[in-house]
Image (cartoon, coloured by chain):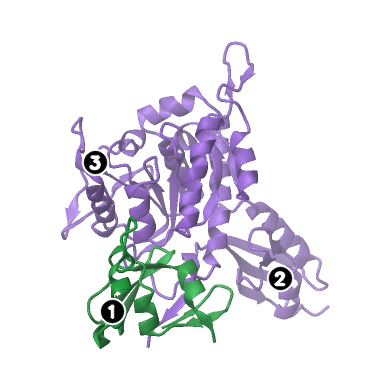
Amino acid sequence: MPSPTNQEVLDALAQINDPDLGRDVVSLGMIKELAVDQQGRVSFTFELTTPACPVRDRFKSQAQDLVGAIPGVTGVDVRMTANVRPAFMRPKPSEILPGVKQTIAVASGKGGVGKSTVAVNLAAALRKAGAEVGLLDADIYGPSVPAMTNSRVTPEQVNGRLRPVEAHGLKVMSFGQIYPGDQPTIYRGPMVGKAIEAMMVQVDWGRLDYLVIDLPPGTGDASLTLAQAVPLTGVAIVCTPQDVATDIAIKALQMFRKLNVTPLGLIENMSWYVCPSCGHRHEIFSHGGAEAAAQRLGVPFLGAIPLEESIREDADRGTPVVISRPESAGAKAFVEIASQVAARTSIQSFRQLPVINVR
Amino acid sequence: MTITWEDGLVSSYRGEQLRWACPCAECRGELGAPGRLSRLSSLPEDELRVQDVTLVGQYALQIRFDSGHATGIYTFPYLRSLGRER
């Protein structure tokens, strides 16, 4: 039996639809280096838009089955890779963060909902999936990222630019590294904006697939500066389940909508607590508030994270729980959320911003 | 200046039109006080020529005119409502 043509293989693969991007994987350009030899062995590279792809394994088995079913095929060799695409089909990279493909902000309305813990674990989970990841702590007054990632080191200066501190495979930058110890940062609003801009422009971030930005609470200077200075791919909003938290989270979300930054979705933190002595599941801050709010606002619900002692302990020790205890319920929740965030981010790669021409 | 929107629609603008539509506080006035544009009936040539346009985040444009006036942040929804279909 003759070997199939390349076109026959592509036609078979075009039956696979990317659920997030809503198109088939062939027209999305995900099939590369396709080769069919005379013995009927087919090999190709399946290039995902993120290494944290939630449907990675399903794509692989679908591809093997569909190609394997073509008459004349004797073997299928699929290489799964990922290449994060830059946001918004930009013709040229952004000037402020030239090597960064995607910028993901983590925000909340209220403080104390675990924004930094989520940002740190989100970054660590994306890194574990194989992406190049940076973590920018934009909380000038209360930087918690250095402690949570054990990166309380003064950044080195090379050619007048700061080099981010390497921690757990992440490139970390925080005001807590520049002013360590218990010295407070006493800044008025406009200075906060300048400080955040400096942490983008004066820092050598190098090439990154994702830059995760941990924002301070509120809808003021820090969030505004960021939304004005960089084309943010999207923002993930963290809240706890009770009404006082979701109400404020909604305000934050609406602010980003006004600034044309896509809400990637809501994350519910401290969603439940399993008592270690009685094994009962307690919903201390209520449950399901974020999911209900997400539905009301028409944005994705990205997942829920339990209230676990280990998450807090490991954050205090400086290792994100997704690295220190990958088998814990908390770590699994973070990994799942990270792949949801990555999938939502990939959609933005195919979104086109308005094109402006001046004559 | 022309803008090709996400949905394919093309809007075109003249510098003069954009200058008179400047949304900045000086031109528009603030807190109920009338702005500069409401007191003028004409502007010199260099006030009306667009020199440069910069993207503000992804929600607006900052337009600089030859005169140096550049304080207006024109949001995309505002520009869309200003623009006429070609």
Q: Residues within 10 Å of mark 3 (few under 14, many from 20)?
A: many
- Of all chains, the one bearing label 2 is A
Residue at image mark 1: B65
Give how far across and how far down residue A174 sits, in percent: 28, 44
For discs 3 and 2, the disc positioned in front in the rendered view: 3
Q: Residues within 10 Å of mark 1 (few under 14, many from 20)?
A: many
User: Quick check: A136 above or below A176?
Assistant: below
For discs 1 and 3, the disc positioned in front in the rendered view: 1
- In this view, the residue farthest toward the top is A277
Q: Which color was chain A given?
A: purple
Q: Which chain is green?
A: B
Left or right: where A315 falls relative to A335: left
Give how far across and how far down residue A203 sits, in percent: 26, 56
- The lab-note entry on whether marks 1 and 3 share a chain reads no
Give how far across and how far down residue A207 sits, in percent: 36, 61
Residue at image mark 3: A177
Q: Nearer the viewer, residue A10 or B1?
A: B1
Q: Can you see residue A81?
A: no
Q: Which numbered dot is residue A41?
A: 2
- Amino acid residing under circle 3: Gln
Q: Nearer the viewer, residue A98 or A248?
A: A248
Secondary structure at badge 3 equals helix
- Amino acid residing under circle 1: Phe
Secondary structure at badge 2 equals strand
Give how far across and how far down residue A325 sits, in percent: 50, 31
Left or right: where A265 falls relative to A108: right
**Callout 3–callout 2 Cβ contact below 8 Å:** no
